[in-house]
Amino acid sequence: MTLLLKNISAAVTCDSTDNVLENIDIFCRDGMIAQIGSDLSVTADRVLDCSDMLCYPGLINTHHHFYQIFSRNLPHVQGMQLFDWLRALYKIWQNLDAEVINLSSKCALGLLMKSGCTTAFDHHYVFPGESSLELLEAQFSAAEELGARMYASRGSMNLSEKDGGLPPDSVVQTTDTILKDSMAAVERFHDPKKGSMRMVALAPCSPFSASADLYRESAALARSLGVRLHTHLCETGDEEDYTLSAFGMRPLEYMRSLDFIGSDVWYAHGIWFNDDELELLRDTGTAVAHCPASNMKLSSGAARIPDMLKLGIPVSIAVDGSASNDGSDMIEEMRLGYLLARVIYGDGAPTAYDYLKMATAGGARTLGRDDIGSLEVGKCADMFLIDRRRLDIAGAHYSPKTMLAAVGLSGSVDCTVVNGEITVENGRLTKTDEDMLSRQSELKISGYLNGVI
């Protein structure tokens, strides 16, 4: 399969030298970028005239909960903070099944791709019943149907309310079941090759829903299997109070005591780190997924992104769960992060381009991948395009590097390419019927929520 994008007005590469290339072509072959240059003399199976188009590397979402898209904007949880919010919503999430997971994953991935996202990590940790493989299969099937590059987690919880945790008994599993399933998930789904479309990380949910043994043994298993590790950490002050009371340690020190730290680990949120802890993150190469919209909605706080970037801590952008964000839009997330930092740090805030770099090269670094995150020959053919003649960016496209985080975008991008295939064209998904997906989802949601709200 070959694809030629001709006459691109400007391509923001997000490479190590921050190049912006003007009036160029990009030739994609077998899912990779084969050539970049002016007036390329090549033939292709599909040729797109990209005159007046701005081109960017595919955005990389490093933390999400796809299943939550079916529990968005529920009136009875609005205004709650994290712990109460979770207790209320677990009553819904305990009814998850493979069809809910498949449809919600399609909706979330579709929305992400329409906002220029080409690689998405989903932190799924709610597994009613004994086996997780059916639900992970439902996610990978959704990603394959839509053409998305999928990074899934075998998330886990083994502390229920009776153990001092937050979730009900119906959604937790034993450590033995989790570890057995985790090994099976990696063996069945994880593809470590360059250009991989499916990868798996091991991801205990949080210090208040996963035991010390589960964290410690998950870390050992992941390293024996050569996969990465992920968890929520330092999201709220309540979490800090919990670990101090339960373990006599702040959250990051607790993770260090369990060997759940290092260059193969990334944490979601990372709001409540102190100076010494930021230096520990730097020294260990541990990464952070920044989720500004969710952090604002749940009143969790604001991560110290300028300090992290100055120290060289790997930082990426993530939308978090659709029920705490109520959206799956990576461009909106970049803009919210940029504006939030401007409110707090003023001129010391990162630039709008810094947020684009976090959402591209930063995401690749967080996920341990060197084949995505920039427009370069030899990298995966993942990118998106925006017509600079659009009314919503009139007068704004003269600085393409800063436009997305500073100005944003109304509605879908014009074109998204994943693995050299067009997955969004003229603002619509190409591999599924959006209207049919919406109708199917609404029917499933009505049954899923019946009697719960």
Image (spheres, rainbow, N blue to C red):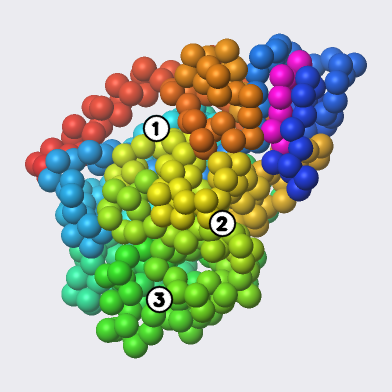
Q: Give the range drawn in magenta.
A: 6-13
Kind of residue at disc 1: Cys
Residue labelled with disc 1: 107
Towards the viewer: 261 or 389: 389
Circle 3 — which element? helix
- What residue sits 66% from the left and 14% below the top? 52
Q: Is residue 111 magenta?
A: no
Q: Position of residue 141 (x, y in %)?
A: 49, 37
Residue labelled with disc 2: 315
Towards the viewer: 276 or 171: 276
Kind of residue at disc 2: Val
Is 229 rendered above or below residue 147? below
Majority secondary structure in the magenta region: strand
Q: Tag 1: Cα neighbours inside 10 Å, few (<14), some, or many (≥20)? A: many
Circle 1 — which element? helix
Question: How many numbered marks does the figure carry?
Answer: 3
- What residue sits 25% from the left and 50% below the top? 93
- What residue sits 29% from the left and 48% below the top? 297
Most extreme residue toward the front is 347
Circle 2 — which element? strand
- What residue sits 33% from the left and 74% below the top? 240
Nearer the viewer's eye, disc 2 or disc 3?
2
The Cα atoms of the two marked residues, 1 and 2, are separated by 26 Å
- Which of the labelled discs sits on residue 76, or is there none? none
- Which of the labelled discs sits on residue 251, or is there none? 3
Q: In which quarter of the image is residue 327?
A: top left
Is 232 rendered above or below residue 377? below
Towards the viewer: 443 or 426: 426
Is 363 rendered above or below residue 239? above
The Cα atoms of the two marked residues, 2 and 3, are separated by 19 Å
The first of marks 1 and 2 along the sequence is: 1
